[in-house]
Image: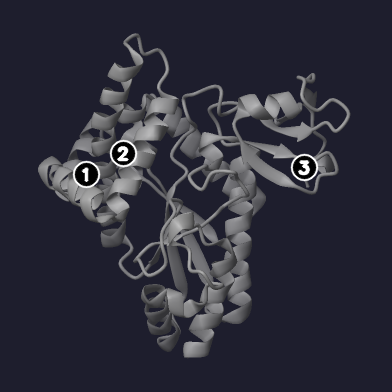
Amino acid sequence: MTSTAAAILSTLLPHHRTPEATAPAEAATPTHFPHQLRHLETLVAGRHPIRFTLPGFPCKSPNPAKVVGRLPDEGERLALRFLDRLCARIGELYAPGARLVICSDGHLFSDLIGVPDPHVDAYNDALRAMIRTAGLSHLTTFDLRDVYGDRPCDAKRAEAHRRYAPSLDSLRAETRNAAAHGGETLRLYRGVTRFLFEDTTGFEGTRSALQRACRTRAYGVVQRSRAWGALIAEHHPDALRLSIHPQPPGTAKFGIRLLDAPDVWMTPWHACVLRDADGGGVRLMRAADAARLGRLVHRDGRPSHYVRDVHEAGRPAPARTATPTQLS
């Protein structure tokens, strides 16, 4: 039992996303993750299928310098395929298999990050279609529509916040305590503040005024992130929680890296894909940076990713349309 649980956890370890400062000096082993190991041991003992929940895949960043469009593209496609293959590999070790629920949280934050709710719906619908079309049988999705149906988005946000979010005073106190003694709350607050600052478009005030506004909004984002986590736990009580944010070993969440990126906070929805010219290497980066290194490729009639042009690196190149073999 323990050896099977350890083998399953070892499948995840190469993809662990951790803050560099908290990474263990030696190579990580299952014993560095006692919470996840105990959870897996319980599931294996009962011969239950393993279910993971992963909050994320909310919507595209509103900053056009980061992304190539509003809908899922090559970044999401590769990330989804990776997650499906990860579950399949676990199924080879453990007969009951593994499934992963993508808990799309765009509607929780859309009013705070400046993305219209119809854009979130379009992104979520396209994501579901991408999973279905690619035959990613180990993946399912979950969002506020599965909880509150067709109620207005403002009402759904308000209800989730009312029922599950911590108070602003308690969160501010927790952040102050983390600043004095260290802790993940401060790291998350700073990371969210940075993203809000980078993604804000059309702000007419000063840089310092924008920074103040983003610090205020960051508390709201963290509040709703906590609310979403509590709601997910209520609806998926036996699931093992993954996170797209860096997580140190020993915590209840297991941070998972979806694609190679220069920044541990970077995700497919805050960046775009740059492929090497030979189709081998894949890397996430800001769209503005990728445009200086490669050619824009379209898939299904919309921008998808960039392909590095080794002969014209460093200057923009004309767009082209990908063939199926180029995207395999």
Q: How far apart are marks 1 and 2 (CA)?
A: 8 Å
Three-letter code for the amino acid on which mark 2 is drawn: Leu
* Residue at 62% over, 68% down: 88
Q: What element carries label 3?
A: helix
In this rendering, does residue 132 appear at all? Answer: no
How crowded pointer 3 is (Cα within 10 Å; few <14, some 14-19, many 20+) is rated as few
**Picture disc at residue 327:** 3
Q: Name the residue under label 1.
A: 160
Q: Which of marks 3 and 1 is nearer the N terminus?
A: 1
* Residue at 50% over, 65% down: 99
Q: Hey, which quadrant is residue 77 in on the image?
A: top right
Q: Hey, which quadrant is residue 67 in on the image?
A: top right
Question: Is 119 placed above or below 108 here?
Answer: above
In the image, farthest residue toward the right: 311
Q: Name the residue under label 2.
A: 108
Q: Is residue 89 left or right of residue 48?
A: right
Q: Hey, which quadrant is residue 294 in on the image?
A: top right
Q: Do the residues labelled 1 and 2 touch (CB within 8 Å)?
A: yes
